[in-house]
């Protein structure tokens, strides 16, 4: 599968588990993406306020300082980021977590334990190309 169309895409990874973050950062960089990885929502929000505008944000929900839900609420207040898709990447798979995240503005919800980093990369790629509708049911099993 050609991944050339992802070269230069800016990806913001918001994940407090360094090992998990490093895996995704390595994968996306290997595919030619520009990656910024931070360990909590507050740091991610600061990056956005400093002017970093990613093509996509991968957001964990459970983090210190500012969790994913709080981050989603704060990003809504930044009109210049309204078009940036936020994909929740969490191991929480309860229907309430999914519904709340989508209601707060997430465009998709991916249970990370269900997919490999390569599968997540391809899902993000497909999402940015518009070939994934954001129907989380295709990921939650």
Image (cartoon, rainbow, N blue to C red):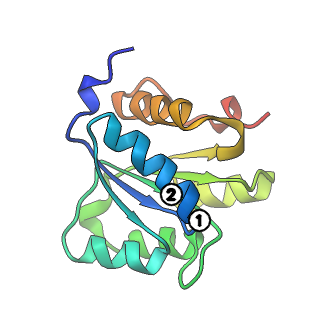
In terms of depth relative to the viewer, which is nearer, 106 or 29? Answer: 29
Please identify the quadrant where the N terminus is shown: top left
Around disc 2, counting alpha carbons within 10 Å, would you say few (fewer than 14), some (14 to 19), or many (20 or more)?
Answer: some
- Look at mark 1 in the image and give the residue it sits on: 17
Q: Give the numbered dot on residue 70.
A: none
Please say if the residues under marks 1 and 2 sit with CB atoms less than 8 Å apart.
Answer: yes
Q: Which residue lies at the image location 60% right of the left edge and 74% below the top edge?
A: 63
Q: Quadrant of the C terminus?
A: top right
- According to the picture, the residue beneath numbered tag 2 turns out to be 21
In-front residue for pair 69/40: 40
Q: Secondary structure at mark 1?
A: loop
Report how far apart the C-alphas of labels 1 and 2 lie in the structure: 6 Å
Question: In the image, residue 52 lies at what x, y percent?
Answer: 22, 65
Instruction: Please provide percent x and percent y for residue 3.
Output: 32, 23
**Residue 65 location, x and y as percent?**
54, 85
Relative to 65, residue 58 above or below: above
Between 10 and 80, the one lying in front of the other is: 10
Report x, y in % for residue 80: 23, 64
Q: Quadrant of residue 5?
A: top left
From this view, report whether residue 31 is shown above or below residue 65. Answer: above
């Amino acid at each position: 599968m050609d991944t050339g169309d992802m070269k230069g895409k800016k990806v913001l990874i918001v994940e407090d588990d360094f090992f998990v973050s490093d895996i995704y950062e390595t994968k996306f960089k290997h595919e030619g993406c520009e990656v910024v990885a931070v360990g909590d929502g507050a740091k991610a929000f600061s990056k956005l306020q400093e002017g970093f505008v990613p093509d996509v944000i991968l957001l964990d929900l459970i983090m210190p300082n500012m969790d994913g839900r709080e981050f989603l609420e704060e990003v809504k207040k930044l009109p210049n980021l309204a078009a940036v898709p936020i994909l929740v990447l969490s191991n929480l798979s309860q229907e309430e977590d999914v519904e709340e995240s989508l209601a707060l503005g997430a465009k998709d919800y991916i249970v990370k334990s269900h997919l490999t980093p390569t599968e997540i990369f391809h899902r993000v790629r497909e999402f940015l190309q518009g070939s994934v509708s954001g129907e989380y049911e295709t990921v939650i099993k």
